[in-house]
Image: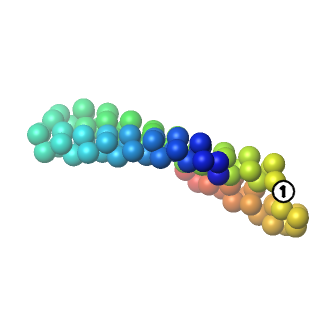
Amino acid sequence: MATTCDKSILNRLKRAEGQLRGIQKMIEEGTECGDVITQLSAVRSSVDRVMGLIVAENLKNCLENPAADTEVQHQKIEQAVNMIVKK
């Protein structure tokens, strides 16, 4: 994975981490359940996006730099597709 991609993904994960800390504080302060759920949903969407970016980068790399062994290449692509579908 490229360094710029790593930095972008790390920034997204740090934001999600901050959101989770905020949610913990909301719970400690007795914030309404609906508001907590809304924030949890936002974190889940953020993590899903990071997962998609990682799988997409992996697939792109796999297609741009195919393995010498076609069976290995097929397995890599199948694994990436399974990660997307599994969600």
Residue visible at 47% across and 46% down? 10
**Relative to residue 33, is residue 40 drawn left or right?**
right
Work out whether residue 78 or residue 65 is closer to the camera in this orientation and state it.
65
Percent coordinates x, y for residue 5 in the rendering: 59, 44
- Give the side of residue 41 with respect to residue 76, left or right: left
Question: What amino acid type is highlighted by mark number 1?
Answer: Pro
- Give 42 or 58, whichever is nearer the viewer: 58
Vertical order, 7 against 66 (above or below): above
Q: What kind of colouring is applied to the model shown?
A: rainbow
Residue under the point 83% across and 62% down: 67
Q: Name the residue under label 1.
A: 66
Question: Residue 38 appears at what percent x and percent y?
Answer: 32, 33
- In the rendered image, residue 83, in percent from the top left (x then y), is placed at 62, 54
Q: Would residue 12 be visible to someone looking at this image?
A: yes
Question: Residue 11 at what x, y percent from top left?
Answer: 45, 41
Q: Which residue is drawn at 69% across and 59% down?
A: 79
